[in-house]
Amino acid sequence: MPLLKLVLLVLLISRVTPVCQLQGRALPPELTQTGDFTLGGIFTFRTGYTGSVPTFQTLPDPPKCLNINVREFKFAQTMIFAIGEINRNPSILPNYTLGYRIYNSCGMTNIIQSALNLANGQKEMIDERNCTKADRAQAVLGHSASAPTVGFARIIGRFHVPVISHFATCACLSNREEFPSFFRTIPSDLHQSRALAKLVKHFSWTWVGAISNKNEYGVNGITSFIQAAQEEGVCVEYYEAFEQTGPPRELHKVLEAVKRSTSKVVVAFMSHREVKVLAAELYKRNVTGLQWVGSDAWITDHSLTDSEGHGLLVGSLGFVISRARIPGLEEHLRRLHPSLFTGSQFVRDFWEDVFDCSLNPAVDTQRKPCTGSESLQSVDSYFTDVSELRFTNNVYKSVYAVAHALHSLVTCEEGKGPFSNGSCADTKHFEPWQVLHYLQNINFTTSGGETVTFDQNGDSAARYELVNLQRVTSGTMHVATVGTFDSARPGERQFIMNSEKIVWGGGGETVPVSVCSESCPPGKRKVLQKRKHVCCYDCIPCAEGEISNVTDSMDCFKCPIELWPNSRGDACIMKEIEFLSFAELMGIILTFLCLTGAALTAVIALVFFYFRETPIVRANNSELSFLLLFSLTLCFLCSLTFIGRPSEWSCMLRHTAFGITFVLCISCVLGKTLVVLMAFRATLPGSNVMKWFGPLQQRLCVVAFTLVQVLICLLWLTINPPFPYRNMNHYKDRIILECALGSAVGFWAVLGYVGLLALLCFVLAFLARNLPDNFNEAKFITFSMLIFCAVWITFIPAYVSSPGKFTVAVEIFAILASSYGLLFCIFIPKFYVILLRPEQNTKKHILGKTKYIQ
C-alpha cells in the first residue's frame, strides 16, 4: 500500500506544469562590465524628471529624466577608472577582476528599484525548475543625495549588503541600528553642522536665519547646526524649510521670513536644487545684501550658474571636503567615446550635448551630423576639469575601500580567519555579511597619502576646506579656499582661516554685521530682554566697585579690596593713596603756618632776650617766658610730623610729641598763672608765700607736670603704640594712609591730661584776672586758655567726623590755633609794648597801682 501511494505521487508530480515563472525583468544598468566580483553604482545622470502618479494597481511607468547632470556622470566615470586601475594592479585582488553595473536613476522609486536590482539581480533562466541565478553586487556605491540613500540603505541593509556613499552626509545615517551596512567616505553632517556653527561664531554673527529642505538631510543637518549654534552663543532668528517639488506656499513662507528678518546671515542646509529656486525668487523680489553660509551639497555645485539670481550667492561661505589629485583620471575622462559604451543611450546624449551634433541624423534633424572626429582631448569643460577633485575623490576612495575589503576576504588563510574557529569565507560562495565585516575593518592609504578608515558607525574622519564663492556668472564659477577645519585637531586649532582672501556677501569688502543687539563693551554687562532671544539684550554699566573686562559679559565682578575700577570700568587699578602731603595745597598752607608760627615765636624770643633786663620782661617771670616760647616753638614744629606719608616712627612721634610739648607749654602757662597769684599774695602785709614758690619750685612744677605726660606716653608706646594703617573702609575708591591710635585709651589719656591742665590753668587765670596791676598777665592767660579750651572742645567732634586726610588737617589746625592763641594773647601785648610803647616799659608804670593797693 505505501508503495502504491509513492508511485501515484511520482506520476502526479511528473504531469504538473512548472510554477517557477518570472513576473518581470530588472531594469538594465546604464553602464556595465563583467568581472569576478561586481560593484554596483547608483548615480543620477539627469536632474529633474516627469512621471505618472502611481495608482498602486499596476506597475508605474519609468520616470522620464530631464537635464544632464555632468557631475554625476563624472562620478560614474571615476568609479570605472578606479576599477580599471585596480584590475591592472597585481597587488590588489590578484587573479580576480572587478566588474561594475552602474544605474542611471532619477526619482526616488527608480533609485530604490535600482538598489534592489543590485542587491538581488537576475541572470537568464537556466531551467524551468531553477528560474534564475542570483547576480548580486558585492557592494553598492551611491547615492549622491542623503534622502535616496536613506531610502534604499534602510532596505538592503537588512540583507547586509554593504552600501558606501561618497556624498550622503545626513547624520541620521550614522545610526547602526537603522543602517547596519552603511559606510561613507565623506564626513557626517554632524561635524559639518558644528563647523558651520564655529564659522558663524568666528565672525561674531550671533543673529542668523536658517533654511533647509524638507527631508532627512536638511532637517537633521539644520537641527544639528541650531543645537551647535546655541552652544556657541548664536541665536537663530527664524527657521523655515521647503522642497523644490513642494507646495508654493512653503516657498512663499520662506521668502517672507527672509524679507522681514533683521539678520543679515542665512545658513542654508539644502541641495543645489532648492538653492537655485530660492536665489531666483529672492532676485525677483530684490532681496539683496545677505551673507550666505551653505552646506557642501550646494556650495561648489556648478549648476548654480544656471540660476537666475546667481549673483546673490557671491560671497557665500561653506565647508567642503579637501581637494585631491587622482593621477590618470583626466586622461581617462578625455578618452571617453560613445564607442566604448555602445549600450548606453546616455553616453550618446552626453556626446551630442557636448559637441552639439547628432549621432543619428535621421532621428535628430535639428543638429548637424557628428563627423566622427570629435574628441574630448581638446575640450575644456567641467567634465574634463580635474583641478577641483573633492567628491570625485570620495568615489575613488569608495571603490578602493571595497577592493581592499574583497582583497582581505580572498587572501584569508584558513585557521587565521575572522570567523568561527578561525575560518575564512568561501571565495566562490561568500555572504554579504562577510564582505561587510572586512569593510568595517579596512585601513589603507591612497596614492595621494590619504588614510581611509571607518569608525564603528561607518563614518570617515572630518576634514574640511572652507571655501568662498567669489564669482558666479552664467556658465562660470570661481571658488577659493580660504581656510580649513579638522575635527582631529585640538579645539583651538581645529579652525584655521585667512580672512583677507574672503569676498563677502553681495561682493562686499567688509565683514557683514549680523547681531540682534550691539556688543556690550567692557565695563558693561548684558541684561536680557523679556520674552526675546538671549542674543537680544540691553547693556548697562557695572555697579560701583565692579568691572567687566570682556565684550558681551553677562556678569560684572568685584575688584579686590585694594583695587578699584578705572573710568571705563574694564580694569581694576590700584586705589588712589590719600594722605596729607607736603606737595598739595592744604599741606603747603599748613606747613607755611607751622613755620611762620615757629619763626614768629623765635623772633619774639630774640626780642625778649635782647630786652631781658627791661621791667616788662623781668616782671613776667622771664625764665618761664623763655621756656614757654621754647615749648610753643616745639608745638608749631610738631605739627609738621602730621604732614607726609605716615610711617611707623612718624605715627609714634606725632602724638607723643604733641602731647608732651603741649603739656610743657600748659605747665609753663600754669606756672606763670601761679606766679601771678603768689606775687599778689606776697605783696600783702605779713605774707611769706613767695619763698614757697620761687624759681626752683616753678621749675619742679613744670618738670613734674611734664613727667606725668611722658609717663603716659611711655605706657602708650609700650602697650599698644600708634602704627601706620591703610584705611579702606571710609572711601570705596581710595585708600587713606593714616596713623591708627593703637590704644584709644592712651590717646584720650594724653589728650585728657592736656585738657585737664588747660582747664586748671583757665580757672586760676580767671580768678586772677582782676588783680590790681597795670599789666596784669592773668587777663591775657585767661583769654589764651579760653581760646585753647574752645579750640580743643570743638576739635573732638570735628576730629571724629572728618574724613581721610581732613582728620589730620583738623588736628594740625587745632594745634596751630591753640599755639597761635597762646602766642598772641600772652606775648604779642608785651612785644607791642617793648617795640612800640617803650615809655610803658618802666618799673614805675608797671607798679603804678601798687601804691593804691598798699
Image (tube, grey):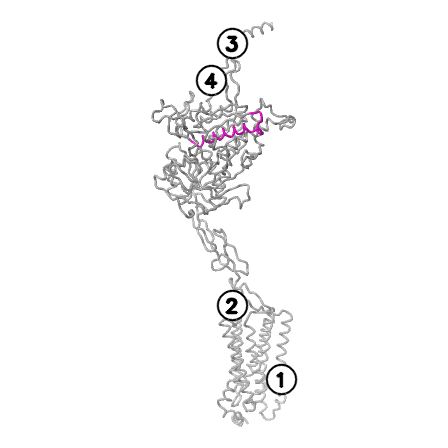
Q: Which mark is residue 699?
A: 1
Badge 1 element: helix
Q: Tell me which label, 2 or 3, sits earlier in the chain.
A: 3
Q: Earlier in the sequence, mark 1 or mark 3?
A: 3
Q: Which mark is residue 23?
A: 4
Q: Residue 592, percent across and down?
A: 51, 76
Displayed quadrant of residue 721: bottom right
Q: Disc 1 or 2, which lies upstream in sequence?
A: 1
Percent position (x, y) of residue 168?
Answer: 48, 33
Q: Amino acid at mark 3?
A: Val
Callout 1, which amino acid? Arg
User: Hey, which quadrant is residue 371 in on the image?
Assistant: top left
Q: Is residue 637 above or below residue 28?
A: below
Looking at the rendering, in which quadrant would you find the N terminus? top right
Q: CA distance from mark 1 to mark 3?
A: 157 Å
- C-alpha gap between disc 1 and disc 4: 143 Å
Alpha-carbon span between mark 1 and mark 2: 41 Å
| Residue 310 in the image, given as x and y percentages of width and height | 38, 39
The three-letter code of the residue at mark 2 reads Pro
Q: Nearer the viewer, residue 519 or 614?
A: 519
Regarding mark 2 in the picture, which secondary structure is present there? Answer: loop
Q: Which residue is mark 2?
A: 803
Which residues, given as a range, are shown in magenta? 69-96
Look at the picture and state if 573 lies above or below 396. below
Measure the C-alpha gap from mark 2 to mark 3.
121 Å
Mark 3, residue position: 16
User: Please, is residue 783 above or below residue 257 in the view?
Assistant: below
Amino acid under disc 4: Gln
